[in-house]
Image (tube, rainbow, N blue to C red):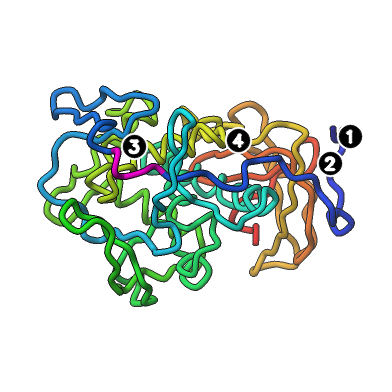
Amino acid sequence: MLKKSLLTSAIVLGTLASAVAPTSVLAADASNSDTNTEQTSSDNSKKTTDTNVISGSPVKEADPDIAHIETVQPSAAKTKAQGALVQAASGTTSSQQQAFLDMAVPMAQKAASEYGVYASVMLAQAILESGWGASALATQGNNLFGIKGDYNGSSVTMKTSEWSASQGWYTIYASFRKYPSYYESFADNGDKLRNGVSWDSSYYKGTWKENASSYKDATAWLQGRYATAPTYASSLNNVIETYGLTKYDTNSGDDSSTQAPGDVNVISVKNPNAIYVPMVTFNGDTMGKATRGLQNNTPWQTDQVKTYNGHVYYRVSTNEWVEDTYVI
């Protein structure tokens, strides 16, 4: 547990403890999809099961702007455990997984709050599509969701894996959006879920919080639309459950704590417009200006994260917080 005053440079924190998490998860056998699939109708699209392969209401066409990178294509491995999982993190350690979550959670929550979707679903998508941020697409293009095309004119070309009932898995090359940082990738995914595709702005309406009573409703709607894999919804559900991602879902974008007190992470701060980084205070729902600032290009401990008015804030002392704008 931290002492009352947290404001301490994190230079000496070279060996922070990482939360223990499974290092890999097993893939569902697509050959069993005929017996494990529950197809839901448009009038009953929220009916899902915990462990079966599930899907949303029937769709005429999957989103053509989405593709899976080859490194996270489901394998043919089988599992006897209840509820099969997708091979999303082969070769990653628990500390690498926790480091990815430390970075990704505030970004996912900010984007989810802005677009009215589930942060847990976005995180699960990012984990599956990018292999915990370890894929070539993630490292070269900051693209966590396999979205094709370009972002402000920037793109990278990658080998991708598609699935169809007639061909199974097959490989193609495609251009993918290249983002300046992971946050733009989360925001772009949130924008897609909220605003749909060119021919249907409500294409992903089943993922919106006002239409989805739980993350399972949202993942059911994604199957067949966002991804062609027949196990996509059940894979997302199992990742969410395995890593407890629902704790990152919040009911509001304001004053919502997203990190358990006592869990210590490290951030670096920089203000490009001044020689110091400003901090703020919170008194209930009211934000104030702190009397102190942080030196540029220095690392600091943080034990809590919250969102407020569309920004993520990191606690660096008892009641002093740094806005995400200044976090590197």
Q: Which label's residue is closer to the chain start, 4 or 1? A: 1
* Mark whose residue sits in front, 2 or 3: 3
In space, the residues marked 3 and 4 are separated at their CA atoms by: 22 Å
Q: Which residue type does callout 4 highlight? A: Thr
- What residue is disc 4 on? 258
Dot 2 lies on which element? loop
Q: Quadrant of residue 256?
A: top right
- Between 5 and 189, the residue placed more toward the observer is 189
Q: Could you tell me which residue is drawn at 87 percent across and 49 percent down?
A: 8
Residue range in magenta is 28-32
- What residue is disc 2 on? 6
Q: Could you tell me which residue is drawn at 49 percent across and 51 percent down?
A: 88
Q: Which label's residue is closer to the chain start, 2 or 3? A: 2
- Between 32 and 129, the residue placed more toward the observer is 32
Q: Which residue type does callout 2 highlight? A: Leu
Dot 1 lies on which element? loop
Q: Main secondary structure of the magenta part?
A: helix
**Residue 121 percent across, percent down from the top left:** 42, 40
- What residue is disc 1 on? 3
